[in-house]
Image (cartoon, grey):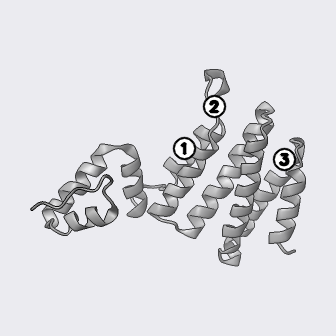
Amino acid sequence: MARPRKSQPTWTDVKEKLATFDRAGLLALVQHLYAANKENQTFLHARFDLGADVLKPYKETLDRWLWPDVSRNQYTSVAKAKQAISNYKKAVGEPAGLAELTVFYCEQATGFCNDVGYQDAGYFDALVRMFEQALTVTNQLPAGNRGALIARLDRIRAISHNFGYGVGDDLDFLLKKYVKA
């Protein structure tokens, strides 16, 4: 008698099926996943450190969603930008790459707000939270790798005083909290 099907399959169900595959079957499955969409390709390229710059596709996503082309009626999406960083964490999660992406996020968000005068409290809140994440991950790097990233974050902090909403004050506080002179 067949076992009744669950309404939603789980990872356990998938893992059980994968256990029946041989090497050729697994390679064929990965090839099909690779061909299925760009996100899978980006994930595998990053996971296996393929290509000249594994951060490039993640930065392109951040750029698109944090600094949209307003003349083409594009809009911002903090969620889609943060998803790019989350996807990188799942694929590689290497601290230096994560630090670069979080600082780049802050640069793009700050640049966009400064360039077009974007005033959105939610966007600013997300910037402050990402700034703190950038400081946290940067502080996990060896001392010799922190300086350039901290300098970039300091430039972001200085620009943020143009925004209002207390963003500049929040970034001042965070920089002082995480960076000891």
Label 2 and label 3: CA atoms lie apart by: 22 Å
Residue position marked by numbered label 1 in the rendering: 61
Q: Looking at numbered disc 2 in the image, what kind of residue is underneath it?
A: Tyr
Q: Kindly state the secondary structure of the residue where label 1 is placed.
A: helix
Q: Residue at x 66, y 37 (%)?
A: 67
Q: Which quarter of the figure has residue 66?
A: top right
- Element on which disc 3 rests: helix
118 to the left or right of 176: left
Task: Tell me how far mark 3 sits from mark 1, CA to CA.
Answer: 23 Å
Residue 75: assigned label? 2
Amino acid under disc 1: Thr
Residue lying at 44% horizontally and 61% vertically, measured from the top left: 91
Residue 145 image point, x, y percent:
67, 71
Q: Could you say which is closer to the camera, residue 82 or residue 147?
A: 82
Q: Say which label, 2 or 1, has the lower sequence index.
A: 1
Q: Which residue is mark 3?
A: 159
For residue 180, which numbered disc appears in the image? Answer: none
- Please provide percent x and percent y for residue 9: 30, 56
